[in-house]
Amino acid sequence: MTFRVHVRIIPRPGLLDPQGQAVEHALGSLGFTGVGSVRVGKAIELQVEAVSAAEAEDAVRRMCDKLLANPVTEDYEIEVEG
Amino acid sequence: MTFRVHVRIIPRPGLLDPQGQAVEHALGSLGFTGVGSVRVGKAIELQVEAVSAAEAEDAVRRMCDKLLANPVTEDYEIEVEG
């Protein structure tokens, strides 16, 4: 079976995120109020062949650990589409 | 109320995504098989003050249209945390 998987990779809390700060500032300049804690990271979508959703998630977790995310500076979340 | 909102911004289908192709190729080189259709975009997290989740989503939709996404080349999805 083929699963569509979404990965969200975001800078760890506490780490400086200059891109997030720039976006937050720009949103304020455009008149958006009440916006805070903006973090900018990567969104990755991919299709994975696997026998179950759990196995697809496992495979993508290994991909994150090996290539997609930086474990020192980034957290990731994996979501497998039904 | 403060809502935590996740935005996923991905290159539109049909548009070339060189970063996605590079990731797909790198995953293959690392021995991950059965992976395809890799797309790489931006993940943005932010906190928004709003009276309801629907209003928070509306505000973030306006932010996407004005600043966060490029409507010509990117699609976005918004998810408001409960």
Image (spheres, coloured by chain):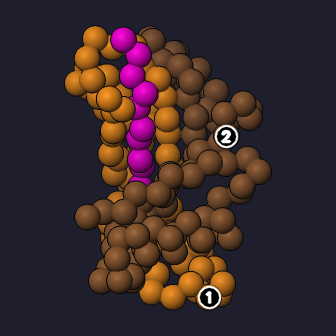
Chain colours: A brown, B orange
Left or right of A28? Residue B57 is left
- Residue at 36 percent of width and 11 percent of height: B1
Q: Which residues are magenta?
A: B1-10
- Secondary structure at badge 1 equals loop
Chain containing mark 2: A
Extreme residue in the right direction:
A72
- Spatial CA distance of label 2 from label 1 is 28 Å
- Which three-letter amino acid code belongs to the residue tagged 1? Gly
The image quadrant that residue A81 belongs to is: bottom left
- Residue at 73 percent of width and 47 percent of height: A73
Residue A4 pos. (x, y %): 34, 69
In-front residue for pair A80/B40:
A80
10 Å crowding of disc 1: few (<14), some (14-19), many (20+): few
Residue A75 pos. (x, y %): 62, 48
Q: Is residue B18 visible?
A: no
Left or right of A18? Residue B39 is left
10 Å crowding of disc 2: few (<14), some (14-19), many (20+): some
Residue, disc 2: A12
Q: Is residue B55 magenta?
A: no
Chain containing mark 1: B
Residue A18 pos. (x, y %): 70, 33
Q: Is residue A48 visible?
A: yes
Q: In the picture, which quadrant includes the C terminus of chain B?
A: top left
On screen, residue A67 above or below B57: below
- Residue at 60 percent of width and 65 percent of height: A64
Tally the numbered discs.
2
In-front residue for pair B56/B11:
B56
- Residue at 34 percent of width and 77 percent of height: A52
Residue, disc 1: B31
